[in-house]
Image: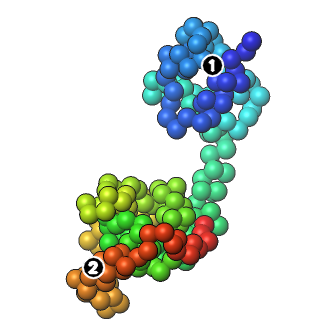
Amino acid sequence: MSLAPALEAMLLMATEPMPLDELASALGAPVAVVEGELLDIAAFYESHSRGIRLRAVAGGWRFATDPEVSHVIEDWLVSDQRTRLSQAALETLAVIAYLQPVSRGRVSAVRGVNVDGVVRTLVVRGLVREAGEDQLTGATTFATTPLFLQKLGLNSLRELPDLAPLLPDTVALEAELGHLAANEPSTAPAEEETHE
């Protein structure tokens, strides 16, 4: 029985190059047999001029796009339609940027709506990351990523525009957030907004 379908499925799901011995162990097959299958799969994609290739990189195996179609991938990734954030996502990103590290609950309190889905979208897009736990509540906190700075053309968060003319001072804002968090019912979910 060919190991190719299982190998392809595993490599498709992998986010990092998969070492040969790890693949062999997962399939319960000899390393030499798995290596032969991988070479056959790589040859198949190469000989059939497919849009993907199987490559041995960084001590493991992974799928990659064919260099011949790199211009298509680049255009797709940078197109406005693919990179535009919704108003809800932009507002949520701004709250996280200015109050980070900040929990979803605090962001929801500032925005007045449930932001779980929007935060997930921002994490998937690489603009926001988990930053630990809130010392008081134990909730997961979020912060912006280097990609966020890159997209805004900033070297550091200190270059973000001053919000003083638009928001109450930080002490007043923190006090208001604390008040909202203390009075927020834990059983009634906030209205969730659509995102993308």
Looking at the rendering, which quadrant does residue 195 occupy?
A: bottom right
The colour scheme applied to this rendered structure is rainbow
Q: Which label was assigned to residue 183?
A: none
Q: Residues within 10 Å of mark 2 (few under 14, many from 20)?
A: some
Residue located beneath label 2 in the image: 174
Toward the left, the furthest residue is 171
- In which quadrant will I find the N terminus? top right
Residue 173 location (% of width, % of height): 29, 83
Between the C-alphas of marks 1 and 2, the distance is 56 Å
Q: Amino acid at mark 1?
A: Leu
Toward the bottom, the furthest residue is 165
Residue located beneath label 1 in the image: 38
- Out of 150 and 15, give the one closest to the viewer: 15
Q: Nearer the viewer, mark 1 or mark 2?
A: 2
Looking at the rendering, which quadrant does residue 68 occupy?
A: top right
Q: Residues within 10 Å of mark 1 (few under 14, many from 20)?
A: many
In the picture provided, is 161 more to the left or to the right than 115? left
